[in-house]
């Protein structure tokens, strides 16, 4: 049973490591516009940031003072996050 955000983070890290960049962007896009926050979402966001760093993907376009914006959908092109407008 998962009881905290760290456990969710580990669950998502396991999932993310097997995804292509396009699939990772799709996972990100599923959370765009969320209006709630809980342990699962915190774990997801922490794992997403860690996976982007691990893959050396530039996410500066959505990075705001150590927090990522989930306002816009994204795609990953040439190791860089690009916002879809």
Image (cartoon, rainbow, N blue to C red):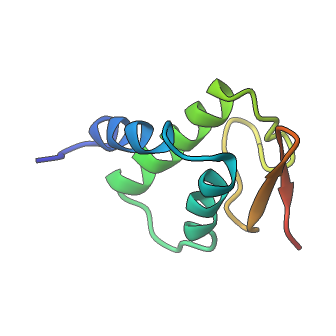
Q: Residue at x 61, y 51 (%)?
A: 24
Q: Residue at x 86, y 55 (%)?
A: 82
Is 1 located above or below residue 33 in the figure? Answer: above
Q: Residue at x 25, y 42 (%)?
A: 4
Rendering coords of residue 77 (x, y %): 86, 49
In the picture as drawn, the residue positioned furthest to the left comes out as 1
Q: Residue at x 68, y 55 (%)?
A: 22
Query: Which quadrant is the C terminus positioned in?
Result: bottom right
Left or right, residue 58 beside residue 17: right
Rendering coords of residue 18 (x, y %): 49, 40
Rendering coords of residue 21 (x, y %): 68, 47
Left or right, residue 42 beside residue 24: left
Identify the image quadrant of residue 55: top right
Rendering coords of residue 46 (x, y %): 50, 39
In the foreground, 18 or 48? 18
Left or right, residue 78 beside residue 62: right
Identify the image quadrant of residue 80: top right
Is 62 located above or below residue 85 in the figure? Answer: above
């Amino acid at each position: 049973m998962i009881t905290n955000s760290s456990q969710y983070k580990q669950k998502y890290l396991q999932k993310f490591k097997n995804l292509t960049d396009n699939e990772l962007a799709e996972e990100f896009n599923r959370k765009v516009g969320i209006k709630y926050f809980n342990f699962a979402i915190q774990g997801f966001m922490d794992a997403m940031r860690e996976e982007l760093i691990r893959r050396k993907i530039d996410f500066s376009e959505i990075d705001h003072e150590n927090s990522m914006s989930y306002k816009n959908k994204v795609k990953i092109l040439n190791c860089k996050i690009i916002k879809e407008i």
